[in-house]
Every structure is written in structure tokens, then in C-alpha cells.
Image (tube, rainbow, N blue to C red):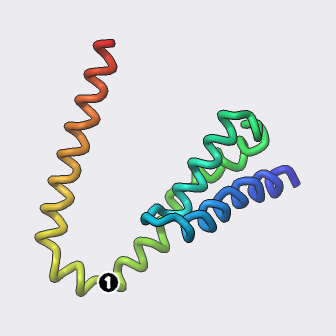
Amino acid sequence: MQYIIQFIIIMVYVYLGEFISTYIPFPLPGSVIGLILLYISLELKIIKLKQVDETATFLKNNMTIMFIPLTVSIMNSYDILHRNLFPLVITLIISTTITMIVVGKFADRKERM
């Protein structure tokens, strides 16, 4: 019963995020908004970590299972991927490089503090 209650608490935040995302003027996924709301609630002690800890750990440890439907649905778009393979690979390389540089700069700056 404890896991069900913890799961319901997490899902309330997910659905609240989805609801809010339909009313904000810029595109931000509802799941991200839900995570932000959950984080704020944990920081402000609105909910306690022990109220969601075990279910959140279970979901985190089994996160790879959640990517299977996404991977299968990508194969439905194989023609589009095949036609645009070169631009996609270049975009991935550039964005990954930029991300690594920015994270490295921030880590270096934080280490100097």
C-alpha cells in the first residue's frame, strides 16, 4: 500500500505539471514542470523525502524500461531518420561538444571557488 501512495504522490506532480504546461505561453514539457514542482515541494518540506523515496528509487533504477517504447516508435520514423541522417549526426556532435565545454567551464569555475 505504501508504494501505491508514493506512486500517487509522484503522479499528482506529473499531472499537475502537464496541466500547467497547457497554460504557459512557452513550450516546456509537463513532466519537467512536474519535476520542478516536486523538487520545490521537497525543498520547502511540503512533502517529506520518505513519502516518495522508495518508489522514486524504484523508478530511477528501472528507468531503462521506460525508453523501450520510445526506441520502438523511433523505428516507425526510419525513413525520415535515414533521409536526414547526416544533419542529425552533425547536430548531435556539435550539441554534445558544446554541452561538454559548458559543463567543463562551470565545473572548472566552481572548483576554483
Can residue 66 be seen here? The reply is: no
Depth order, front residue of 70/17: 17
Sort mark 1 into few (<14), some (14-19) or many (20+) by Cα contacts within 10 Å.
few
Residue that lies at the very extreme toward the front in this rendered image:
25
In the image, taking residue 19 as reference, residue 82 lies left or right, namely left
Residue type at the position of mark 1: Ser
Can residue 20 be seen here? The reply is: yes
Q: Position of residue 111 (x, y in %)?
A: 31, 16
Residue 21 falls in image quadrant = bottom right
Which quadrant of the rendered structure holds the C terminus?
A: top left
Q: Pointer 1: what residue?
A: 77
Q: Secondary structure at mark 1?
A: loop
Q: Position of residue 63 (x, y in %)?
A: 54, 56
Say how many tags the image has: 1
Taking 110 as reference, is 81 above or below it?
below
Taking the spot 30% from the left edge, 26% from the top edge, the residue there is 107
